[in-house]
Image (spheres, grey):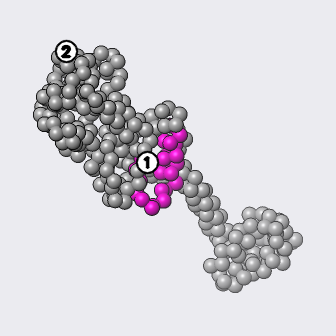
C-alpha cells in the first residue's frame, strides 16, 4: 500500500475536505486529489463521494480512515519511543557490580539515575570480581562497576573512577588494635575472608607472596562484606577491607585499625565495559552520570 497516499487521504478525512488537507500538508489541491485517486485505484473501491462543495467518506472510506488513524498514531508512538530510547530515557540497563560498589556506591548512584530516567528498567547483579568479568564478557551485563585490584583482561575496557585505601581491622580488645606491626605478625592472626574470586582476598594473598610472608589462616569465610565485618565486631579475627566499607565503624569505635609497617594499599573502583563496543543510550547515560557524581563527591 502507498503510505504517502494513505497519509494524504487520512488528512482529507480528518480535516473534512481537500482544501484544508492541502493547507495542512502544504501541497496543492490537485496533488491531494491525485493521491486519493491513486489510493482508490490501488484499493479497488471509492473512498470519497461528492457532497456539495465538500466531500463525504464512503463506507469503505470510513473503514480505511479509522485504520489509518490508528496506524499513524502508532507511527507517532514508535517515533516518540525511538527518541526516548536514543536519549537514554527508556530501555533496560543491566549492571553487574562487585560487593563494595554494589553496597556502598550504587544505591545512591542508581537512586539519582532513576530520578532522571524513571522509565528505564535497572537490573543489578552483585557478584565477586571474577564473576563480574565473566558476566560482562558473556553479555549478561553491559556495564560492570568493579572494586579491587585489576589485571588486564582481554576484551574489557577499564576506567578508574576513584580509589580508597585497604585497611586491616581487628576487634577493639585485640592486642594489635591501634598498633603498628610488621606484616608477618599480622598474618599470624586468623582472618575472616571473602570467598575465592574476591579481589581483596586475592590482593592479600598476592601481597604475602610478593613479600615472602606466609599467608593468613582463614578462620571464617563469608560471601559478603557485611557478614565478615559483623564477625569482627562480634570479637573474632581480622579482616582486610576497603576503608569505604569500614570507616564509619572505626570512627564509632566498633572495630579498630591495625597499621602494618611500610604498607599503604589502595583499592581502585572502576567502571568496565566491553572494548570497541558502543554502549546503549541508557548505559551511556548511566556512565556519564556516574562520572559526574564522582567528580562532585570525590
Q: Is residue 243 left or right of residue 196?
A: right
Point out the stretch of residues depicted in magenta: 271-293
The quadrant holding residue 11 is bottom right
Secondary structure beneath disc 1? strand
Of the two numbered discs 1 and 2 on the same chain, state the one appearing first in sequence.
1
Relative to 54, say whether 200 is above or below.
above
The quadrant holding residue 193 is top left
The residue identified by callout 2 is: 173
Residue under the image location 40 percent in, 50 percent down: 158
Residue under the image location 61 percent in, 60 percent down: 79
Of the 4 image quadrants, the one containing the N terminus is bottom right
Q: Residue furthest right?
A: 53
Q: Nearer the viewer, residue 158 or 195?
A: 158
Number of marks in the rendered image: 2
Secondary structure beneath disc 2? loop
- Density class for disc 2 (Cα within 10 Å; few <14, some 14-19, many ≥20) is few
Picture disc at residue 74: none
Relative to 147, say whether 52 is above or below.
below
Residue 255: % across, % down = 26, 20
Residue 35 showing in the rendered view: yes
Q: Nearer the viewer, residue 161 or 280?
A: 161
Residue 290 is covered by the magenta coloring: yes
Relative to 141, say whether 27 is above or below.
below
Residue under the image location 75 percent in, 81 percent down: 37
Q: Nearer the viewer, residue 55 or 280?
A: 280
Residue 123: % across, % down = 39, 47
Residue 45 is covered by the magenta coloring: no
The residue identified by callout 1 is: 159
Relative to 266, say whether 6 is above or below.
below
Residue 98 showing in the rendered view: no
Amino acid at each position: 500500500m502507498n503510505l504517502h497516499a494513505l497519509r494524504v487521504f487520512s488528512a482529507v478525512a480528518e480535516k473534512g475536505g481537500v482544501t484544508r488537507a492541502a493547507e495542512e500538508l502544504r501541497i496543492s489541491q490537485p496533488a491531494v486529489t491525485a493521491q486519493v485517486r491513486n489510493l482508490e485505484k490501488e484499493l479497488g473501491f471509492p473512498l470519497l463521494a461528492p457532497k456539495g462543495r465538500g466531500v463525504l467518506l464512503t463506507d469503505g472510506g470510513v473503514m480505511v480512515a479509522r485504520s489509518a488513524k490508528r496506524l499513524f498514531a502508532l507511527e507517532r508512538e514508535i517515533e516518540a519511543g525511538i527518541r526516548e530510547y536514543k536519549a537514554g530515557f527508556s530501555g533496560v540497563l543491566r549492571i553487574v557490580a562487585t560487593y563494595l560498589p554494589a553496597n556502598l556506591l550504587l544505591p545512591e548512584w542508581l537512586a539519582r539515575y532513576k530520578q532522571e530516567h524513571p522509565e528505564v528498567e535497572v537490573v543489578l547483579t552483585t557478584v565477586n570480581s571474577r564473576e563480574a568479568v565473566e558476566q560482562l564478557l558473556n553479555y549478561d551485563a553491559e556495564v560492570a562497576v568493579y572494586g579491587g585490584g585489576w589485571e588486564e583482561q582481554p576484551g574489557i575496557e577499564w576506567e578508574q573512577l576513584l580509589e580508597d585505601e585497604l585497611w586491616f581491622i581487628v576487634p577493639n580488645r585485640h592486642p594489635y588494635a591501634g598498633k603498628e606491626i610488621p606484616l608477618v605478625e599480622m598474618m599470624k592472626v586468623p582472618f575472616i575472608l571473602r570467598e575465592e574470586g574476591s579481589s581483596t582476598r586475592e590482593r592479600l594473598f598476592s601481597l604475602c607472596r610478593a613479600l615472602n610472608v606466609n599467608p593468613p589462616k582463614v578462620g571464617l569465610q563469608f560471601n559478603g562484606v557485611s557478614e565478615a565485618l559483623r564477625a569482627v565486631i562480634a570479637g573474632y579475627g581480622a579482616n582486610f577491607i576497603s576503608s569505604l566499607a569500614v570507616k564509619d565503624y572505626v570512627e564509632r569505635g566498633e572495630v579498630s585499625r591495625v597499621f602494618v609497617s611500610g604498607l599503604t594499599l589502595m583499592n581502585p573502583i572502576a567502571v568496565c565495559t566491553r572494548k570497541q563496543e558502543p554502549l546503549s543510550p541508557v548505559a551511556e547515560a548511566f556512565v556519564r552520570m556516574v562520572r559526574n557524581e564522582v567528580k562532585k563527591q570525590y
